[in-house]
Image (cartoon, grey):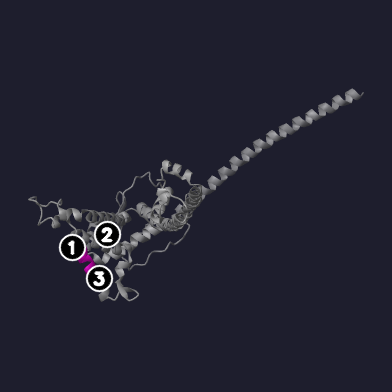
Amino acid sequence: MGQWIVFHAKYSMKDFRNKAVVRYGWCPVPEYLCTWQGSSSLLLTLFLFLMLSLEPILHCLENNDGYIFTEHCKDGEDVLFPYSVMSTCAMLLYFLLLSDLSVFSTRVSAFALVCTRVVMEVVLYLFGLTFFVVAFACAISALEQDDPDFAGIPKSALQLYKISLGMFSGAHYDMLMDYPALMFAVFIYVVTTVIFMLNLLIAQLNCSYQATYQDMLGFARLNRGKILMETMPSVSKKRMELFKDTLKLDDRVEFGEGDIGLSGGVQVWELASANITTIDMIRRFGGSTSPAAQWPEEENGDDEEDRFDRMEKLIEKAMKRMSSGSKGSKKGGTQGSSMGQSSSDQGGDSSVHESVEE
């Protein structure tokens, strides 16, 4: 809690000093609290402070019955449940802030971004479900019936939520058979929420996911870049220099065994069979390597390598034409022989017809 208090005090003073505030009516709010990380960490600090004020061990210091650091006393048990609620909320906020580490993996970060963009559809569904629950709870409470499960608006709303979540048991459904009007109202509610709204939520999730999936990797890379840019000012110059020295950017990168290239890169080894290239893509020129020297121009574009490439392509085209021509001649020979055979057959048939006529 002390670390979070120092963090919020530091950034609040920094934003107020730089006048980086956002006004909600008359209340100025520091700009860093407009992000979900800042607001979540502030809520976490508040819950930790409430946990400290509700700590059962502190309430049992004066009346501990001879046991040190006990929480089972009259004063401690009175605040044990509120303390557990604050502890639950604090743990959820801790893991919510932990999800920010997904930027270390582009795939996980893309999945997290899709979840954050799709969750708004779920919020809309819950808002619509609450509206229908309140409407039908009020309508059922106005109905003449004495079912104990639907006695009043709060109980009716609770049972309707159970129906939507599949927690309403079969025995309670059997009790609805004694109240036909109540059974009809529950039937209309099930058709409206469970069948219509739930399928509408599935359709909305599919459409939202398809629209976000195309750009999610790009969004993940942009999010990583944003976090890096926001984190860089907090890194000390000494630590940054040490990190830069470990990269060895001044050393020349080795393209192959004994083939020393340029500096300013990070060498990554891979298998020779991973990306097979039959053409050397590196142009080498002799002379000075000074940055002030002008890059030498090619005297003629028709060098020996290009000529060999052209000859190889021409030979491949000629071989393809010869193979296609030989196939065509074979097909033509077979067609000609079949035509000759058909004509001879027709001539034999005509001679037979003439002899029969004579």
User: Residue 326 vs residue 55: left or right?
Assistant: right
Nearer-N-terminus badge (2/3)? 3
Q: Are marks 2 and 1 in contact (CB under 8 Å)?
A: no
Q: Position of residue 171 (x, y in %)?
A: 42, 41
Q: Which mark is residue 249?
A: 2
Label 3 element class: helix
* Foreground residue among 133 and 171: 171
Q: Earlier in the sequence, mark 1 or mark 3?
A: 1
Above or below: residue 41 compared with residue 325:
below
Residue 86 image position (x, y, % from top left): 25, 57
Mark 2 vs mark 1, foreground winner is: 1
Q: Nearer the viewer, mark 2 or mark 3?
A: 3
Task: Quote the CA–CA distance across marks 1 and 3.
Answer: 15 Å
Residue type pointed to by label 1:
Gly
What residue is pinned by disc 1? 2
In the rendered image, is residue 344 in sight? yes
What amino acid is found at the position of numbered circle 2 in the picture? Leu
CA–CA distance between discs 2 and 3?
38 Å
State the mark number for residue 12.
3
For the residue labelled by badge 2, is the local secondary structure a helix, a strand or a loop? Answer: loop
Contact? badges 2 and 3 (CB < 8 Å): no
Badge 1: residue crowd in 10 Å (few <14, some 14–19, many ≥20): few
User: Which of 25 and 332 lies nearest the eye of the viewer?
Assistant: 25
User: Which residue type does callout 3 highlight?
Assistant: Ser
Give the label on residue 102, or none: none
Q: Is residue 271 magenta?
A: no
Q: Which residues make up the magenta segment?
A: 4-10
Locate the N terminus and report the quarter of the image it occupies.
Answer: bottom left
